Image: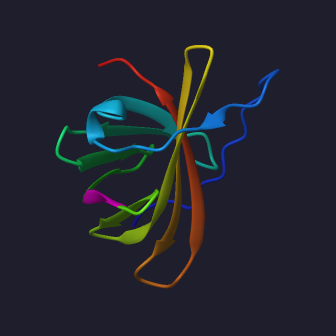
Amino acid sequence: MLFAVIIFTGCATALSQRPVSDFKAIAGTWRGSNNVGNPVDLVVYDDGRFDAVIIAPQQTARRRGQIRVEGQQLVYDADSSYGQMTYQERDGRRRLTMYGTLKEDGTRFVLEFSPGHR
């Protein structure tokens, strides 16, 4: 089960949405947290595949999926959810946001990631 997540981050200036024509712009390790503060690690590969790990005190959930470009949008499909993603960048700051819907029950969630380190 993927945890429903809403993350708020403060920033002095708004980030600008950037179109992604290939996945090299977003490839790498990203880190966020879910609504109860558990870390969520996301690894995006050059071909659009991704692995996500949600680390909770009582369990670790692993998810896999595929991102694709449809027009100007990033769309993803994972084993437990589907939805859209946006990539934003400004002054060297980067953010990847996932707007998803759980396949199991239709619950909607938002995950917001910043570049992470392995």
Residue 100: percent from left, percent from top? 50, 66
Picture layout, residue 101 above or below residue 25: below
In this rendering, position of residue 75 left or right of residue 84: left
Q: Which residues are magenta?
A: 65-69
Comparing 1 with 45, the one in front is 45
Quarter of the image with the C terminus in it:
top left
- Taking the view exactly as shown, the residue that stands out farthest to the left is 47
- The residue at the point 34 percent across, 71 percent down is 80
Comparing 39 with 69, the one in front is 69
In this rendering, position of residue 21 left or right of residue 64: right
- Taking the view exactly as shown, the residue that stands out farthest to the right is 12
Tell whether position 30 is magenta: no
In this rendering, position of residue 114 left or right of residue 36: left
How many marks do you count on the picture? 0
Residue 63: percent from left, percent from top? 28, 56
Q: Quadrant of residue 20?
A: top left
- The residue at the point 48 percent across, 62 percent down is 84
Residue 34: percent from left, percent from top? 56, 47
- The residue at the point 29 percent across, 33 percent down is 27
Quarter of the image with the N terminus in it:
bottom left
Picture layout, residue 17 above or below residue 61: above
| Colouring chosen for the image of the structure | rainbow
- The residue at the point 59 percent across, 56 percent down is 110
Residue 33: percent from left, percent from top? 54, 39
